[in-house]
Image (tube, coloured by chain):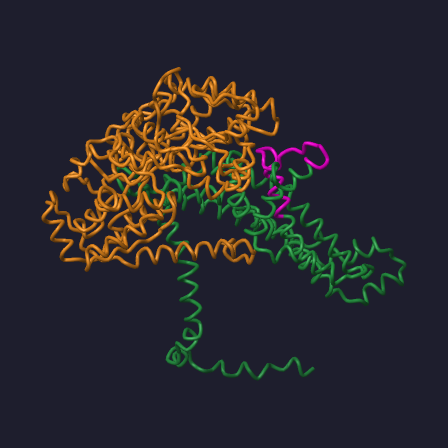
Amino acid sequence: MPTHLSTHSRRLLRGTALLCALALGASACGDSDDGGSNQKAVSEADVQAALKEGGTVTVWAWEPTLKQVATDFEKAHPGVKVNLVNAGTNKDQYTALQNAISAKKGVPDVAQVEYYAMGQFALTEQLTDLKSFGADKLSAQFSPGPWNGVKAGSDGVYALPMDSGPMALFYNKKVFDKYHIEVPTTWAEYLDAARDLHKADPKAYITADNGDAGFATSMLWQAGSRPYTVNGTKVKIDFSDQGAKTFTGTWQQLIDEKLLATVPAWTDEWYKGLADGTIATLATGAWMPANLESGAKAASGDWRVAPMPQWTAGGKVSAENGGSALALPELGKNEALAYAFVEYANAGDGVQTRLKNGAFPATTADLQSTKFQDTAFPYFGGQKANKIFAESAADVPDDWSYLPYQVYANSVFNDTVGKAYVSGTTLAEGLESWQEASVKYGEEQGFTVEK
Amino acid sequence: MTTLQPPAAAEPRSAPPPVRRDRRSWTGWGFLGPFVAVFALVFLAPIAYSVYLSLFRDQLIGGTTFVGLDNYGEALGDERFWASLGRVSLFLAVQVPIMLGIALLVALALDSGRLYGRDFFRISIFLPYAVPAVVATLMWGFMYGTRFGLVGDINGALGVSLPDPLSPDLVLASIGNIVTWEFVGYNMLIFYAALRVVPHSLYEAAQIDGAGQIRVITAIKLPAIRGALVIATIFSIIGSFQLFNEPSILQPLARNAITTDYTPNYYTYALSFNGQQHNYSATVAIVMGLITMVVAYAVQLRGMRKGV
């Protein structure tokens, strides 16, 4: 093909990117060594024996608090080496993991997987069912949302929850006080607050949203919509239930009346908006404080946390937004040792270490502990925000499921639902075309999809 | 009349063919070998592998199956692919003439010798090409910001409300602006280099004949750099069809405007990296490669034809 002969400079860049991808692939394949054991029903004694014997556990994770956990684990078990690899953040890591699994080479022993991506790996039997290690007995230790996440809509346990993101409403108290606006407790009040705020200061918006799949699915979760029904390889996708209508009804008004800042999340503009009060609230996961502290330093003391606004006055329903777990890929080796690490990090002593370093727990005991709940956040003017987060965690309905190919579905969210934010398309229509795109992909991938 | 004599070299004709066969030597291959090996490894093998990939389908449920040419059938009927091709074709039709037009004007201006500070102009116009495309796009992406970017500042300072350059209607034009900025200098340099080799005697002859500057340009300069124009056009066509860097870097800033099927290359990237559809992605890449090849070849044939 003559295209390959061209010396056009863009090709150079693309070539470099390809080289990087190749290099990544090569390094990912570097530590392969066949010996995947398929032993089932591993007893505590086996795990202890494996710990004594020692060996190396390769962990693919981007969660920063795991570094200290790995060091501590190595200290507690001389002879065990934890090889902590950052193979990319979320989607990039899943691509690398999927490629390693397809190639049956260089698969890590432990991989960080977010709840929304769990189904993709679990249903295609790429993750070890941890019930064989007795992980099902740990169910009481974790809050309902994350535990529902690691079950991935089946009766298996495909990972141990690492952190969670029960939702709460972060709001800029200074802005609310300045314009004498009440902090909304329902979404109807939220809409009114959005109008009042924007009227009082045309530069200020109630929140920033220009279409985010994770946010939208969490909102649907809270609104009672259950668009995805997953039964093995049978999938049903339906965005026309009452819950979805409830959500789009309110959100469409926010869009139509131009009450949302269209600043893309995680950009400099976004952080600036959070810091200067032009973005007044954020409904998001409990992992947010650390990001606010580092990204919107100037607003320290301005922000507070409130429970999620409700769809029905006086309700107590929340949802999860984000959060991840540690799973054991089926093709990984050293299963017993890998499980020992996962249990240590997510249900053992590692939890305290991660909490100390700012992680948000998925373990009920820690969520309920007075020490945790009494932690005052200087950034929130000394507010004991964990109380609100812990309550939210307990109020998460545990019957939500994601698609077994949610990673892909989320990647086309802005192609479809995103249109509602920039054109005359409505949210409901956007969800409909998202549904179509998801159905099409599901069928192509061999799922039985019911519409 | 000595030239009519049979050349002496014809004599060894009498040497019998078998001798030549015996003397067949692999020395030539020895010289060629390193090239052929690298060529096969980095050029032929990837294409062959893509073609091989395109004949299969890998599903999350059901694994890999041989599907023959099914993927090609799907690609030919894929609205998203054709939409992306339509988008880059529009880009090609609008941006390339503008870019080459500006490049040509600048090259002619530099070549006219009437410009004060010629070398400074030449280097400063070429400079954007030396900025990596990624950096250039990030820079422009920041300027396009309506809240804190240059556009936002202009809006604030003048009290106007400029349209958002990253909105779905304008984002293609905004990308065109970035690409033009990046590549005017590059194309200018090609044209300028071609203009420099035009013999001065032609200009002197034209002057003696009383031709004005415009006439010199249309009668001497443009025909002289015709080859360079064709080459630059072909490069630009290929570049347009392969548009990837700019949309992919602007995507986080304009997620709803730049869809995952925005350009053919971005679409194949998304197919591979979001949906693990490597096989279909390879198919789309091959189809796109063939289309590019045909268009570039057609332009070359047309451009090289004499006396058009």
Q: Position of residue A242 (x, y in %)?
A: 37, 16
Region of the chain picked out in magenta, as a range: B156-179
Residue at figure coordinates x 55%, y 20% from the top left: A195
Viewer-proximal residue among A229 and A87:
A87
- Residue A242, compared with residue A131, is above or below; it is above
Chain assigned green: B
Residue A268 vs residue A91, the one in the foreground: A268
Residue A451: % across, % down: 34, 22
Residue A405 visible to the viewer: no
Query: Could you say which quadrant of the image residue A351 lies in?
Result: top left
Confirm whether the magenta stretch covers residue B157: yes
- A6 or A169: nearer the eye? A169
Residue at image point 42% right, 56% down:
A20
Where is residue A149 shown, x and y percent of the image?
Answer: 28, 33
Q: Is residue B158 magenta?
A: yes
Q: Is residue A341 left or right of residue B70?
A: left
Front-lying residue, B102 or B3? B102
Q: Is residue A136 left or right of residue B18?
A: left
Q: Give the left or right position of residue A43, taking residue A68 as reference.
A: left
Count of marks overlaid on the render: 0
On screen, B210 above or below B242? below
For the point 34% across and 30% down, which residue is it? A387
Residue located 61% across and 26% down the image:
A201
Q: Colour of chain A?
A: orange
Give the side of residue A339 with respect to residue A384, left or right. Answer: left
Where in the figure is residue B247, as x and y percent of width and height?
Answer: 53, 43
Can residue A100 be seen in this snapshot? yes
